[in-house]
Amino acid sequence: MLFHSSIRKELSRSFGATLVVLITIVMTMMLIRTLGLAARGSVNPSEVFLVMTYTVLGYMPTILSLSLFVAIVGTLSRMYRDSEMVIWFSSGRGLADFLPPLFRFAWPILLLIAVFALVGWPWANSQTQGMRDQYQRRSDIERVSPGEFRESAGRLRVFFIDKDTPDSATASNVFISSIERNLQIITSAQSGRIENIGESRYLMLSNGQRLERPLLPGELKISEFRSYGAKVGSDIDPSNGAAPVRAKTTLNLMREPSVANNGELAWRIGMVLAAINFVVLALTVSSANPRVGRSGNLLFALCAFVLYYNLLNLGQNWVGTGRYSMGGFMLALHGGALALALLWLAKRHFNWSWHPFPVRSRSPASSET
């Protein structure tokens, strides 16, 4: 009982500290990334924190897996360094006896990883995608700030307005510059408003003039108008196909088997299987020599995690393009990693040697002869 409780108590402290540090780092990186998207006009600046929160929730399976892996490796490496492992080994405990307390500590975290990977990941992606689509469907007048030159959604026009009206769909002193059909078209009007015609939005200008100048040498054409309409922005309810694969629920991926859906499904299920393998792998790579530092051991453990995680992402691309089947890839990667970790664990538990026969040293007398 003391054996189990002492290990789980130290693992809890190490896991909590590692999780806080990783979440802080990821939130800082996502904040910088989201601010960049907002500066490019892909995300509503007022929803930066919300988008960042959804993004961090989507990355929680990876954060939890890495925190669990680092906590186990760090705790067991510290026990090797302080010779606590020698005490447990002397009391009749082998290295394989550490698996039960490790999984008793890790099973709530593994369950949480499964929930985030199978449910939280698609939900967070659907929420983020919905906010982006809603922000992209706003009108071009709503994109423009008064007194500033701004590009339209498709970067085909440059707008300048003096919007002094409370309605976001109307503006005054509108200036539009665009290039169409090898013509540079400059349009100015006293006022403009957004009108919905069918499923499209149109910018209706009043009391203005239109200048058309060819890019090549040619005649300049100037015309005046009382009312002029141009289609702007996107349709009100655009139908751009199905939802992205990342935003589909796990149940829909199973109901609609396809190459792309299988690749996404292999990644989600693979995150859960990888987290289980990380517990066994962390136990095998945590052994360290007490006479040397443990920085090299931790570096090797992190390299093993990065390699495994990159193979998982690479396998998603392979399965998604039809290069490999989902079952064959998952059996090769996760089954192979588990078999390798168990073989390595058995080697350390039973003190197997790579040399089948002991090497006999030559005696001094024989060397002199």
Image (cartoon, helix red, strand yellow):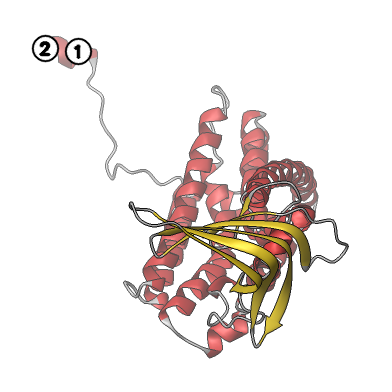
307 in relation to 291, above or below:
below
Between residue 259 and residue 189, name the one nearer to us: 189
Residue 107: quadrant of the picture: bottom right
Residue 14: quadrant of the picture: top right
- Give the x, y percent position of residue 51: 72, 58
The single residue placed furthest to the top in the displayed view is: 368
SS state under label 1: helix
Q: For label 1, count other residues whose C-alpha is less than 10 Å away and answer few (under 14), some (14-19) or many (20+).
A: few
SS state under label 2: loop
The single residue placed furthest to the left in the displayed view is: 369
Residue at mark 2: 369
Q: Quadrant of the N terminus?
A: bottom right
Residue at mark 1: 365
Q: Are marks 1 and 2 in contact (CB under 8 Å)?
A: yes
| Residue 177 in sight | yes
Between residue 192 and residue 153, name the one nearer to us: 192
- Give the x, y percent position of residue 347: 44, 49
- Give the x, y percent position of residue 256: 51, 88
Q: Residue at x 37, y 43 (%)?
A: 353
Q: Residue at x 52, y 35 (%)?
A: 299
Amino acid on which the number 2 mark rests in the picture: Thr
Disc sitting over residue 251 in the figure:
none
Determine whether, in the image, residue 56 is placed left or right of residue 260.
Answer: right
